[in-house]
Image: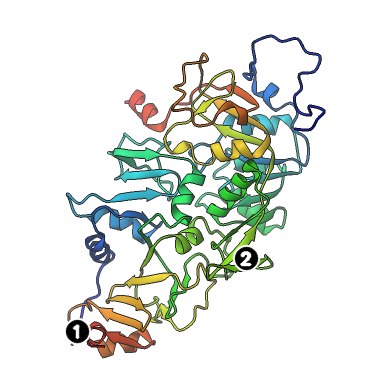
Amino acid sequence: MSYARLTREQIAQRIANDIPEGAYVNLGIGMPTLVGNYLPKGREIFLHSENGILGMGPAPAPGLEDMDLINAGKEPVTLLTGGAYFHHTDSFAMMRGRHLDIAVLGAFQVSVAGDLANWSTGGDAIPAVGGAMDLAVGAKNVWVMMEHLTKSGESKIVSRCTYPLTGIDVVKRIYTDLAVIELTPRGLVARDLVPGLGFDELERLSGVPLAPSGARAAA
Amino acid sequence: MGESGEGLGREGRLSTGMIDKIVPSLEAALADVSDGSTVLVGGFGGAGVPEELIDALIAQGAKDLTIVNNNAGNGEVGVAALLKAGRVRKIVCSYPRLADGYVFERLYRAGKIELELVPQGTLSERMRAAGAGIGAFYTPTGYGTDLAKGKETRVIDGEGQVLEYPLRGDVALVKAERGDRWGNLVYRKSARNFGPTMASAAKCTIAQVYETVELGTLDPECIVTPGIFVTRVVKVPRKKQAAQVREQAA
């Protein structure tokens, strides 16, 4: 049977729908930023930005950019009514002090043990970490948003990360273009496979042991 | 403070009843920055970067500096200009890789600058620790990663943690919006970022502001950096934001 992978926008939509009202959420730089575009209207969710913003709003209308009001990716944003500014150490206390409910982060690899590799591919790139390690250990729930496979078809869910680690045993859930994977104490559980993709095929592509979500319910 | 009253600087001086931390020029503000200093520089991306102070530091000529900043400069302004002028021996930062961070990249690849890469929250907390008199602290951030290599670790409450030491500045350069003669500061939006923490973490903190105001003008409930953390205040002309420039051009 054939199946279509989700677009980045569709993955973002899935994640946005899973964020409950009242959640304090940090959306990582890159793909996770898209999630902000799909937060359900009328659901109050607090977006946090590491550079000192709670209640961050969308990008301003063209011409109204204020370069004193930017997000972690250094792009101009807005502040919602009720939002707040604070300094860096307070901002990272929110992140490191387990106050954020959810961090949505991109990843190069996630291991079956929940290890996250998302800050460096090694090699000779200039090393840069930003707030990735703080979010990885500090958020109550780390959700990863990534494509399931690399461009060359290798699974980004691995038995052991080969890229430099960002955090150990930190990832709770992975949203990919093929499925949602929960990391549970009993192993990885797959749900919401894209239409037409069978569980066996997903497990084969993933290259690591998975359980279907029904099996977890029966266990 | 010791019994000798070290640091008071008031012995033999007449009381004027007029403490004034506002200095007349950028040159005066930076006159005593010496070679080899560790300089904490505020800003995140382009927001909150004390560009006028950095330009004045280049003109002042101090060299062999260690710079602490979240980034390593972009384009050829701010920290990048200081790097380009060859004044920086080492940079301590969390994210030196910016789209237009070519000045740092060239120096780094040529082995002409030392890089200490620190997770952003640890960078901020190390400066907070310096300002708060904390000897060292444990944090889970970075545990088990390359950035914790060679550092002491300990398992606390079942969680691996890394020992981190305070990061002190000889000088801090911060950008605020308004200040008064006692050195009280308020900031603007997300340009606040590292300013308050850096102000507390240096022996000499110099704040550039767009407005100086009379004592009592800043709401005491809303002062973000109390003057005890500030050594000097210098006023600089307000720069037009891109949006304002476009409006005027239209």
Label 1 sits on what residue type? Ser
A165 sits to left or right of B23:
left
The residue wearing badge 2 is B148
Instruction: State whether residue B32 appears in this view.
Output: yes
B28 sits to left or right of A110:
right
Q: Is residue A63 above or below residue A196?
A: above
What is the x, y in percent for residue B198?
60, 39
The residue wearing badge 1 is A2
Front position in the image: B29 or B141: B141
Q: Is residue A180 above or below residue B78?
A: below
- Tell me the mark number nearer the camera, choosing from 2 and 1: 2
What is the x, y in percent for residue B100?
52, 49
Label 2 sits on what residue type? Ala
Instruction: State whether residue B81 appears in this view.
Output: no
Chain under disc 2: B
Q: Distance between the residues labelled 2 and 1?
A: 46 Å
Near mark 1 (Cα within 10 A), the count class, few <14, some 14-19 or many ≥20, is: few
Front position in the image: B142 or A71: B142
* Residue in the image at 31% along x and 76% along y: A181
Badge 2 element: helix
Q: Is residue B128 above or below residue A138?
A: above
Badge 1 element: loop
Front position in the image: B19 or B175: B19
Near mark 2 (Cα within 10 A), the count class, few <14, some 14-19 or many ≥20, is: some
Residue, far front:
B3
Chain under disc 1: A
